[in-house]
Amino acid sequence: MSERFVVIMAGGRGERFWPQSRARRPKHLLPIVGAQPMLTQTIARVLPLVPARNIFVVTTQTQLAAARAVCGRLPPRNLIVEPVGRDTAAAVGLAMLLVKQRNPDAAFAILPADHVIGDVPGFRRSLETAFRAAESADELVTLGIKPTEAATGFGYIERGAAWPGDPRRVRRARRFVEKPGAAKARVYLASGRFYWNAGMFVWRGPVIAAAFRAYAPRLAAGLDRLETALKRTSTKAALKRIYPSLEKISIDYAVMEKSRNVLVVPANFGWDDVGSWTAMARHHPPDSAGNILRGLSWVEDGRRNIVISEQRHLTAVLGVDNLVVVHTPDATLVCPRERAQEIKTLLRRLQADVTTQRFL
Amino acid sequence: MSERFVVIMAGGRGERFWPQSRARRPKHLLPIVGAQPMLTQTIARVLPLVPARNIFVVTTQTQLAAARAVCGRLPPRNLIVEPVGRDTAAAVGLAMLLVKQRNPDAAFAILPADHVIGDVPGFRRSLETAFRAAESADELVTLGIKPTEAATGFGYIERGAAWPGDPRRVRRARRFVEKPGAAKARVYLASGRFYWNAGMFVWRGPVIAAAFRAYAPRLAAGLDRLETALKRTSTKAALKRIYPSLEKISIDYAVMEKSRNVLVVPANFGWDDVGSWTAMARHHPPDSAGNILRGLSWVEDGRRNIVISEQRHLTAVLGVDNLVVVHTPDATLVCPRERAQEIKTLLRRLQADVTTQRFL
């Protein structure tokens, strides 16, 4: 079996989980679902497939200390700090160079750090399928999640014909489409031909490198400069000098929407990106009134609330429905479930005020 | 001028101000409105009229330590502990005996500890008027608050003819009526003849003693036993032995509704019993969206909320209206303004649960 690598993208801020999620302790470093931080769970999921020394975690300087604490099973030098965020294509390019230093032809998976996966053996089978496809052909392989609702928060992948290399498990990808409106999402769902784009990819270095050169030449040139710098100086110094100059663009827009050599592995392993507090309701059993209660939380005469109370603090809710109430030792949030997506707006406002910016 | 006394009733729990108000730190020991605890403000209001040694505070064992801390200007022995709550008539009877030990014929005022009074000089003038009436005649004198709305949360006092002893400032009280329904309250307000019963009374000991004997003979007999015990043993021991046996009845029901020798001093000194969190809105300026914010509180896209955040904790509210959110270091409350009266129900439920009763 060829050597394999996994690169976990752990630079997100998870702002929609404020106030539990903070700049220094974002969503993937918290046990939002399950007893372990999401990043810990992500590492544990891939360890049976890939040795610890071949797992990289790409994070930020702000999060480095907290990330180290949950990445104890990885060599410290496998934690890579992006000096600034340059969107996903640059991060994939960085991953490509890291893997290339170790094994120029190896396949590597790109995995987000903060997703929930209910069926871990199923996930491992899908990832194994994707690795085998990537190792046996010059294809960009993606995992496509079978949609369970007409979601408008994800991009979609339309499947094409069965792939001759593994016709039962792999399809050609016909096209990548961006987040649709509600009507189009319903059409996608009904067609049975569309999958959610969960940001999970597997490819060999030369294949993704060729895609960058073909469809994102500016970024490819930047990555060439970065590769040269990595040979001449430390990873940290090279990144500090070159990374901020890389083109800021998403991997979907830079490569996936344009490439013709894309495969999709249809997958159905209980995936959830847990995008906001509302998603908690899918992973924690409600009480008889539909309330999700964590910690010392109490709802009197209220329905479908999500109440989270950290430490030994009592959070009591009386006579309200459909509210999210999250208490942490230094900050508390109260908002309706249907507005949980707007926490980012709130945080922009808190950021702009000198008395509140320290709570972000 | 005759010697005067004031007895401040400071045994309430102020449950509707939970979680700021607790069994050990109830409403009158908190600065709910103003910079000082309500009890401190109550003492300060009467000190120009009555010397500190003549001011008694009746409180409970649970609150004694906290009450002592705010009653620094009074002799320690003037803090009297009710061993159990026996409603207001027993507390008035106890006050009567305490004053009698010092001066059998002196007039004394009964004042609640936890009310807001906006016009303090006006309050003092009304109290002075009441003292003079009580000292010059065998009358039970009460302060009647001119109503500003058709409130259903107070008893009312209907005025009678001008009192010849001070016809410009004092009226005979025609009758005491219990808390009315909304329709009757509107009639009372429109008539101009009714005042709110704020639980403020002034009388001489022999006059209230005669009223107890006439209209509450069982309680009067109990008070006789208590008086005998007070002569034979310590105040604490006498109270412990006799007080629990006293008839449990309100002063309004026991005496005020039945007596014919009642005067009312119509008063208009910005009185507010601050009965719940909603009342906060009358004493703190709202922001441009009608939100009342105290401490590190933030409302984004919300109106008419009351948000109180203790210490250096940030409480952020997004996209809700008319909510009360109160954060304290160990407990947080979220409820609609219109249900703030129901906090007592919530507390009964928290009391019944072993994991939450320690937060009361």
Image (tube, coloured by chain):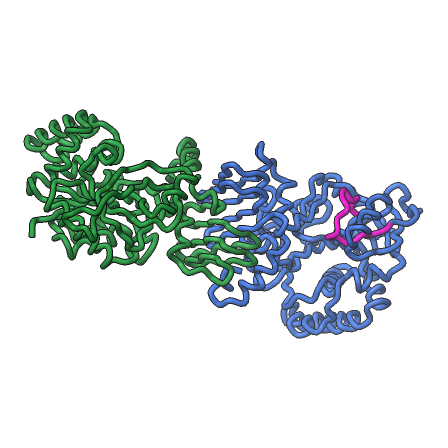
Chain colours: A blue, B green
Residue B188 vs residue B34, the one in the foreground? B188
The answer to whether residue B241 of the structure is visible from this angle is: no
Image location (x, y in percent) of residue B131: 15, 49
Residue for point 86% across, 62% down = A258
**Does the magenta portion include A155?**
yes
- Locate residue B345 relative to residue B126 in the image: left or right: right
Closest to the observer, B152 or B280: B152
Q: Nearer the viewer, residue A91 or B193?
A: B193
The image quarter containing residue A255 is bottom right
Q: Position of residue A343 (x, y in %)?
A: 60, 56
Q: Is residue A259 magenta?
A: no
| Most common SS among magenta residues | loop
Magenta segment, which residues?
A143-158
Name which residue lies at 41% across and 48% down.
B277
Relative to B122, does residue B4 appear above or below in the rendering?
A: above
x and y percentages locating residue A154 in the rendered image: 75, 52
Count numbered badges in the picture.
0
Residue under the image location 28 percent in, 37 percent down: B176
Q: Is residue A13 visible?
A: yes
Identify the residue shown where x is 14% and y is 26%: B221
- Could you tell whether A256 is left or right of B13 in the image? right
In the drawing, does residue B149 fall left or right of residue A101?
A: left
Residue A343 placement, left or right of B30:
right
Question: Residue A283 versus residue A290: which sits nearer the camera?
Answer: A290
Question: What quarter of the picture does the C terminus of chain B occupy?
Answer: top left
Q: Position of residue B49 (x, y in %)?
A: 15, 54
